[in-house]
Amino acid sequence: MTETEERKPRSDEARYDPEITSEFAVPRGLELARAGAEAETTSEFAVPEGLQTPQPPSTEPEGSAFTRPRTYSAKEAPPAFTPAAGMPVVSLVKDAPWQDRMRTMLRMPVAERPAPEPVQRVDEAGPAVPRVLDLTLRIGELLLAGGEGAEDVEAAMFAVCRSYGLDRCEPNVTFTLLSISHQPSLVDDPVTASRTVRRRGTDYTRLAAVFRLVDDLTDPETHVSLEEAYRRLAEIRRNRHPYPGWALTLASGLLAGAASVLVGGDLIVFVAAAVGAMLGDRLAWLLAGRGLPEFYQFTVAAMPAAAIGVAFALAHVDVKASAVVTGGLFALLPGRALVAGVQDGLTGFYITASARLLEVMYFFVGIVAGVLMVLYFGVKVGGKLNPDAALAVSHRPLIQIAASMLLSLTFAVLLQQERSTVLAVTLNGGVAWSVYGALQYPGGLSPVASTAVSAGLVGLFGQLLSRYRFASALPYTTAAIGPLLPGSATYFGLLSIAQSNVDKGLVSLAKAASLAMAIAIGVNLGSEISRLFLRIGSAGKRRAAKRTRGF
């Protein structure tokens, strides 16, 4: 007898042990139902014998973001997962400007961005997330209100967050709204904050101070606490403009006078254009103090210079009246907003670009309304204004180069630039006009192509100067494009419309719009070309700064 047969009776005896007297004991002789047999009590929902029910494929918990998919196979892994060789390591040049480093990471997918290395000292409990986000929004507000491009504003906000160790931050910039979202991990709720930009002002000194603050925050050797950053930000907001009001009015007059000489005016025209521009500036200040929108300020500011030009024509004074009106227009054309709007559109911020260009259109319509009313009145009372005077532009290279440099210098004063940047932007403006004149007059190139090439050099030199000083490029480019603004084409288009020659006027206005777009695209192209020569870093074979091509 085997060992198994010897154990079996013993188990039966244990089952029917007579010593068990419990009422739940099984009586002797009653056979128990085997395991798996069909129960006596049946239901209409019972599974018939012999029918196999499908078993659940897995007993793993549901709802986890880290659960491996059931269809996953280690041998046939889909390409969406991390390859066996790992993800390419992102290498960024440490001594590159923070704008380039942050822009590179913003153009990368979130999952491929390198982890932040906090360069600012924080408490052991970590940084106060709401305070860091608030500081980030306030810095972005000053940059956006000062005219900085949307991509550079996002780069600055991203740099502030990473300097305090906040990962997974996503800034978002529109024309009037700033927002930023921080999600500590995939299982934590995100923290989102926003701020509205209600007031805008032109002060490049304040803009440069904000850039220095962000540069210090991103510098590993300079430790700036949150309290110190807030203190410096408050000082930047309370700073006084470097130039008083009378200096701004004088600068607007000199700018108009230089522009009138640039298009062929003499000394009398210079003085007349300067007086008209200063009167327009004071009237605009008066309307601004009364709370009127900027549309009406531009409309009123454009009238005095046009009125002086019409008065010269009515008095039959042997001066170039068209140069007086053109000089007054140079002081009002919104070149800064135009360049920023086109730059936002070229870098993918279409909502912000549309809003900026719509603002430029309103300003331009205001200027058109002011000048057109005066010209229409002058034509009705017998003013002899000749639209063909544009063909009689005198070529005085040395005088025009000096006028272009004076125009850039006064434009820099109007933009409230730092005194250390005025000389560089003045020379940049002189170079721009020299290239434009050489390409158009001796070279015979079209005005649009000459303007685009000159603006490209302005953008290139401006970016190189800004990278040399780790500052914003706006102070080195905006004032330098002043001599290239299409003031004369705008004036002659309006004059033709006032003389009921609408077709000719629309052609001239279309030329002015083409010149304006050439300036904006040239400046942006020059900036992008300068970045081609800067070593910023990449992620393996996939360039970090590469954008999608529409698919």
Image (spheres, helix red, strand yellow):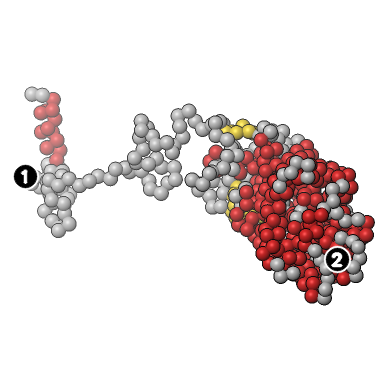
The residue that label 2 is drawn on is 309
> Does dot 2 land on a helix, a strand or a loop?
helix
Dot 2 or dot 1: first in sequence order is 1
Q: Nearer the viewer, mark 2 or mark 1?
A: 2
Amino acid beneath label 2: Gly
Q: Residue furthest left?
A: 29
Q: Which mark is residue 258?
A: none
Residue appearing at x 68%, y 38% in the figure: 529
**x, y (%) of residue 47?**
16, 51
Residue nearer the viewer, 436 or 458: 436
Residue appearing at x 14%, y 58% in the figure: 44
> Does dot 1 land on a helix, a strand or a loop?
loop
Residue 304 occupies quadrant = bottom right
Residue appearing at x 72%, y 36% in the figure: 220
Q: Which mark is residue 29?
A: 1
Residue appearing at x 68%, y 60% in the figure: 507
